[in-house]
Image: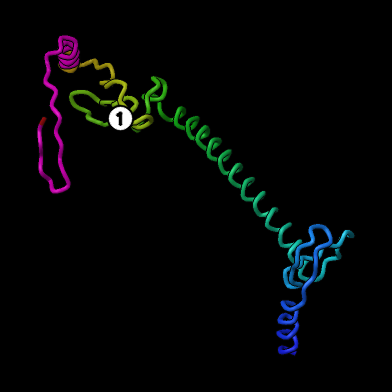
Amino acid sequence: MRNDILEFFQLERQIFGICPKCGRFFRLSECKIHIKEKKTLDWLGELMKKFEVVEKAEEKLDETEEEIREQARVKGRKQALRVVRKIDPIFTPRGLNPDDAKVLLHPIDYIVFNGMKDSGKMKNIVLLDRERKDASFRKLQRSIEKTIESGNYEWQTIRIDEGGKITYK
């Protein structure tokens, strides 16, 4: 049977015809046969059609899944912010991100690098401390306020590389 098929294809290359429209010679093996009526699908055609339907459904499902995941992310962030607002009486009411805050406790409670976590650029530095009744703490707070207002402080950048080497600028 295999030899019969090979012989058939070899014979196709030897059978010639003339195109009725353009008058050119052609080989039978080069022909593409077109039928005007709709062809009936065989088992492979049916299988491929079903496969295409499944692929389209999978693509639509993937798109829908991504949309649902994004909606869930947005909803989760909103819920997290609501919860943080309830349990965070210090930073959130002042429009500060708690992730930007570093705890010092003495001489002030917190230093907040405002905007650092959200945008990667600091808007300002906020020194945050609670109102103290103790006169010595209040005196220290006023001293810090006066120093900042007068600009009587040094600004120095300190960098520590991976090897532990410290450089000052």
Left or right for 165, reference 46: left
Answer with the quarter of the image where residue 156 lies.
Answer: top left
Q: Position of residue 80 (x, y in %)?
A: 48, 35
Left or right for 119, reference 106: right
Give the residue drawn at x 30%, y 25%: 122
The colour scheme of the drawn protein is: rainbow
Q: In front: 104, or 15?
A: 15
Q: Is residue 104 visible?
A: yes
Q: Position of residue 35 (x, y in %)?
A: 86, 62
Give the residue drawn at x 50%, y 30%: 82
Q: Position of residue 8 (x, y in %)?
A: 75, 83
User: Disc 1 residue type?
Assistant: Ala
Answer with the quarter of the image where residue 67 lies.
Answer: top right
Left or right for 32, reference 58: right
Return the residue at label 1: 101
Q: In front: 58, or 128?
A: 58
Secondary structure beneath label 1: strand
Image quarter in which the C terminus is found: top left
Graded by Cα atoms within 10 Å as few (under 14), some (14 to 19) or many (20 or more), the crowding at tag 1 reads: many
Q: Position of residue 31 (x, y in %)?
A: 76, 67
Q: Magenta residues?
A: 140-168
Q: How many marks?
A: 1
83, above or below 12, in the image: above
40 falls in the magenta region: no
Image quarter in which the N terminus is found: bottom right
Q: Is residue 135 visible?
A: no
Give the residue drawn at x 74%, y 81%: 11
167 falls in the magenta region: yes
31, above or below 146, in the image: below
Q: In front: 19, or 92?
A: 19
